[in-house]
Image (cartoon, coloured by chain):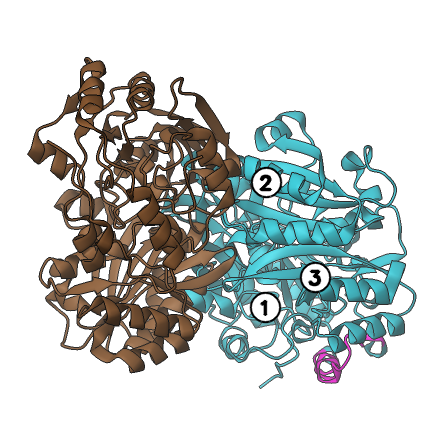
Chain colours: A cyan, B brown
Amino acid sequence: MHSHRPPRTTLANGKSGSGDAREASGMTLANDAPPRPALDAFLTALGDIPHETARNTVIAKSRDFFWYSPILKEQLADCAGDVIVTPRSEADVIAVARLCATHRIPLTARGGGTGNYGQAVPLQGGAVLDLTGLTAIGPVVDGTVRVGAGVKLKDIDLRTRPLGWELRMFPSTYRTATIGGFVAGGSGGVGSITYGGLAERGSLAGARVVTLEAEPQIIELRGSDVKWVHHAYGTNGIITELDIPLAPAQPWVDLAVSFADFAQLGRFCEEVARTDGIMKKLVTAVDWPIPRYLNTLQATLPEGASLGLFMIAAASLRPFDELVAAYGGEVVYRQTDVEVAASGAVPIYEYTWNHTTLQLLKRDKDVTYLQSAFPSLERVAEMGRLFGDEVIQHLEFVRAHGEIGIRALQIVRYTTAERLNEIIRIHEANGCPVYNPHTYVIEAGGMKVTDEAQLAFKRRTDPLGLLNPGKMSGWTPA
Amino acid sequence: MHSHRPPRTTLANGKSGSGDAREASGMTLANDAPPRPALDAFLTALGDIPHETARNTVIAKSRDFFWYSPILKEQLADCAGDVIVTPRSEADVIAVARLCATHRIPLTARGGGTGNYGQAVPLQGGAVLDLTGLTAIGPVVDGTVRVGAGVKLKDIDLRTRPLGWELRMFPSTYRTATIGGFVAGGSGGVGSITYGGLAERGSLAGARVVTLEAEPQIIELRGSDVKWVHHAYGTNGIITELDIPLAPAQPWVDLAVSFADFAQLGRFCEEVARTDGIMKKLVTAVDWPIPRYLNTLQATLPEGASLGLFMIAAASLRPFDELVAAYGGEVVYRQTDVEVAASGAVPIYEYTWNHTTLQLLKRDKDVTYLQSAFPSLERVAEMGRLFGDEVIQHLEFVRAHGEIGIRALQIVRYTTAERLNEIIRIHEANGCPVYNPHTYVIEAGGMKVTDEAQLAFKRRTDPLGLLNPGKMSGWTPA
């Protein structure tokens, strides 16, 4: 079996003005997938390190949730690795890195494969490194825990909550995503309304990184240096362990609150976000018809209702309820975390962030989404007037360096790539930055420009350019 | 012994433009202190409820820390109650309230007597109700604890920290102040950089209040209604119990960081305040020569240094140290909360908020202070240029409804009341609001205007106008 990769001609990503990224991607992709003899030698050399070349398995483990994007869906449909390698330990990772260098085999690291930008999809075949076997969880020391890159986010909390600590933030894929994948491909999520994003100083405390060389090195990044590998898609080192600062744990309550008017819901959410006396982990607002797609919550909602989704600390339920009354909302769902665990109910966060999009895609294949920021609720309303039903509002409130921020993962009724680009352009022209999720190139998404520190670190960790090739457009072979 | 009260002619408070408050105060003070026969009947009726009329005791327990203000010091010097009553229970409180109504005896409630605005000083004699005997601490339910009004703040933490919970905020008088006094007279303090002030929705969950009537009622205030008695100086009910929402506990570290330049320290503090990945309870900046007065910290400081004082979560020390290095500061003091407890060192918060003023007043009787807000660090620098050594900067960073705020308790080299008023006027003319601490009238301090809800509640709880008379200027006898 040989690897599949996208033809050069379809590489254009949906981002307006990302010509440089396109060119750079094209350049990287000009490299061939590994030749058969090199691959065979590599496979033989793997020895007892678990690996799998069965086509179905390889294809399945070469994918992530890029298919949320019709553009990525087309571009990445035929991409796959040649072998899935599943290291049992860091020693295995080092051995695989050494073999990849020796035999010039591209290596794409993956965790739970829950990302949305194709960051886990190999563009040039080679080895897909499934890190879900690295599941060690260390003790909590000074509110920080060292974990293997393959630990599922929920398993960190399962271990640390009885000790009084919990994750500060996690994506809506909490139950299936790994910490390594979150750090390598994510930006924030549930909890960011209190603790900001992963990029905020203090959100990450350390990372252990294996280089891809004939003699792989282990590099321990401390403190802010972890940003070199954060959101770098595994292009500049293989993360094997992470030091994650935690928050003191407390009980949470899932809530859904309906409003007749989306603008009023927005004001309510902003007030909840601003009220420092209400401890929260999640402040989400979705406009009709999104609530119709949120299965366990839909029953009681009238046509046209918008819905707020929240995780509120038990100690803050009363002031929250006061605000619901003051703003004219109605609590339509309320379950404590203990009740959710006991009943097996869907946790409320699985209706938020990019799970909102997933809930719609389950029943409507013609939608996709955007990722953007709004400077104000007024601008949200303006975009609503401008696009009508074509763009359905989905807001996520966050804290960003000491200030409340409005982020959005709008649902878009997709027609053509051209129209999608136009929608993006109109948002940006109106002061609403878009972090384009319809590209697998780091710099064309949220990063906008090449992160020089990440690039410098790549020169150090991946001199042969074999780590997830084609994803970091700023890199060119030496 | 008869009560002492200020002559009407010295009642003017230092606040510019507070003519209304002055007049209203004068009106209230026109009432006489209780006549001897009424007082004697009251004392007899007290029966076995503990009380004390020995002059030294009565004078000592009729004072608080109003003497930080040279203006209040003169106005209140001779004020004292006639008897100190120390209820053992809420039943005792009710009995005393009934007797005060029957015999028309003014009642001034007090906790630790650590306030600074004379709020615990009786203007018309009568009974001083020492509530430090109400020391019950209930279980923590949903992160909230019910406590007696007389519980010391530190004793709440001593009880709840082993259960994983701690106070969200406390004044620098944490070791001696009561929760009832804090709620009745305070506004925020250590912890407000994360959880905002007491006035923020969600900071207070409930209050149990006894009215002063022939048949005293017990009123349970829930949620935001607690604001009716917050910062009302005990003029509209006797608080016997409070429901206090807590934060999940975590280990803290005391730090002092020196900077050569105060402006740079300010920028550093603002960055610490804004960094959501750094969990903190205290962000304080003091300009030279204040550091010279901070005993246990002074040894290593060069002449002219300014000092930042911090409580940082153990998990956030590394990013904090990174910022210290980035901004060119030097950590000159670092002790974990465990080390402080073991060594008996002065906790860092006792150099901050109004303890800063106290540390100076211990060695320099010619200083006093202001309370103000700054819209920006630029304005801090402007006021610094304007006043030079006459006003020494002391900044406290807080969160206020979702935004970082700069508060100040400037040290002022006091000359005359006129000059103090002028300094206040200049600050306000420059967009820096002053919450005048040189007045015992609620509305002339931070409140600025009469809180109609507090006033309405006073009509309900104190129809005879006997609760801490003279402090709420908006109230007039029916």
In which chain is the residue bearing label 3? A
Question: What label sits on residue A180 in the rendered view?
Answer: none
In which chain is the residue bearing label 2? A
Question: What label sits on residue A232 in the rendered view?
Answer: 1
Q: Is residue A155 left or right of residue A291?
A: left
Disc 2 to disc 1, how far (Cα)?
38 Å
- Image quadrant where one finds the C terminus of chain A: bottom right
Foreground: A169 or B426?
Answer: B426
Q: Which residue is mark 2?
A: A320
Q: Please tell me which of labels 1 and 3 falls first in the chain.
A: 1
Please tell me which residue is depicted at 21% across the width and 75% down the height of the picture: B390
Residue A124 at x, y percent in the picture: 72, 70
Q: Which residue is mark 3?
A: A377
Vertical side of A158 occupied by B360: above or below: below
Vertical side of A171 occupied by B49: above or below: above
Amino acid beneath label 2: Phe
Disc 3 to disc 2, how far (Cα)?
20 Å
Amino acid beneath label 1: Ala
Please tell me which residue is depicted at 77% across the width and 67% down the height of the picture: A438
For disc 1, the neighbor class at 10 Å (few under 14, some 14 to 19, many from 20) is many
- What is the span of residues highlighted in magenta in the rendered image? A10-28
- The reply to whether the magenta stretch includes residue A25 is yes
For numbered disc 1, what is the local secondary structure? loop
Q: Is residue A166 visible?
A: yes
